[in-house]
């Protein structure tokens, strides 16, 4: 048996979430952060919120193979080409996660005021039971998963799970995770440095 570092996150039976806390050793996580911070052409994406257009509270970049355009918050993003370092991380993550990836959403959270709101990665082009590999670099941030319940239902404290995502960690979400749960990356009041997160995905090519 091959040794792995996966730790299963205790959720509803049909959800499938596992964390590999030190997938990259500390020095490699650091050098990868520095290299990708410089190599990725970071942009401010615009979001549609209650009929208004606002700047997303983070910098982003959609990267992928040709024909992996991605519709997000009413805007279609055409993929940027893979920086070589990111292409080699994709190869390694495909092995680690036993899945194929043709695209990645890169996010840069500049400080604790940057965040990502509650959502599921359930766009139709991701398919029914997507495997998503989320690599974190830079500052450690808190990530939350919460069950999707009907609006009228009351959330119990046990319906929310908090995970700390350290630099070099990989979070793998699969199975019915996106159908059953939402996730977010909340703002932090404490002073916190920049963080890069990379969510590798498979998009059905158009
Ligand atoms: O920054 C994170 O850890 C989460 C990012 C995320 O949920 C996404 O890109 O869809
Ligand atoms: Fe997400």
Image: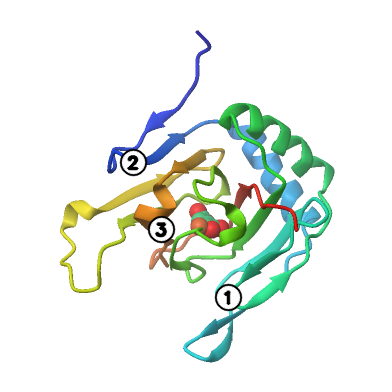
Evaluate whether residue 43 shows in this view.
yes
4, above or below 171, in the image? above
Q: Nearer the viewer, mark 2 or mark 3?
A: 2
Ligand 1 neighbours mark 1 (CB distance < 8 Å): no
Ligand 1 neighbours mark 3 (CB distance < 8 Å): yes
Question: Which of the marked residues, 2 or 3, is nearer the chain's N terminus?
Answer: 2
Q: Nearer the viewer, mark 3 or mark 1?
A: 1
Residue at horizontal 67 percent and vertical 47 percent from the top: 33
Which residue carries the number 3 mark? 183
Which residue carries the number 2 mark? 14
Q: What residue occupies the far bottom of the structure in this picture? A: 52
Q: Position of residue 118 (x, y in %)?
A: 41, 66
Q: Residues within 10 Å of mark 1 (few under 14, many from 20)?
A: few
Element assignment for label 1: loop
Q: Position of residue 4 (x, y in %)?
A: 50, 20
Q: Residues within 10 Å of mark 3 (few under 14, many from 20)?
A: many
Which residue carries the number 1 mark? 73
Q: Quarter-wise, where is residue 69 in the image?
A: bottom right
């Amino acid at each position: 048996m091959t040794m792995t570092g996966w730790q299963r996150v205790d959720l509803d039976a049909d959800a499938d979430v596992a964390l590999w806390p030190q997938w990259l050793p500390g020095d490699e996580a650091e050098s990868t952060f520095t290299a990708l911070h410089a190599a990725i052409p970071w942009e401010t994406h615009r979001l549609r919120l209650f009929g208004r257009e606002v700047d997303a509270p983070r910098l982003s970049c959609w990267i992928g193979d040709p024909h992996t355009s991605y519709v997000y918050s009413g805007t279609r993003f055409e993929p940027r080409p893979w920086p070589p370092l990111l292409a080699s991380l994709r190869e390694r993550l495909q092995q680690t996660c036993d899945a194929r990836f043709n695209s990645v959403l890169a996010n840069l959270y500049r400080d604790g005021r940057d965040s990502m709101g509650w959502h599921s990665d359930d766009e139709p082009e991701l398919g029914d039971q997507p495997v998503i590999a989320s690599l974190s670099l830079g500052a450690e941030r808190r990530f939350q998963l919460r069950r999707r319940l009907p609006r009228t239902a009351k959330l119990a404290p046990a319906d929310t799970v908090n995970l700390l995502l350290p630099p070099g960690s990989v979070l793998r979400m699969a199975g019915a995770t996106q159908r059953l749960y939402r996730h977010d990356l909340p703002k932090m009041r404490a002073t916190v440095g920049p963080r890069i997160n990379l969510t590798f995905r498979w998009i059905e090519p158009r």
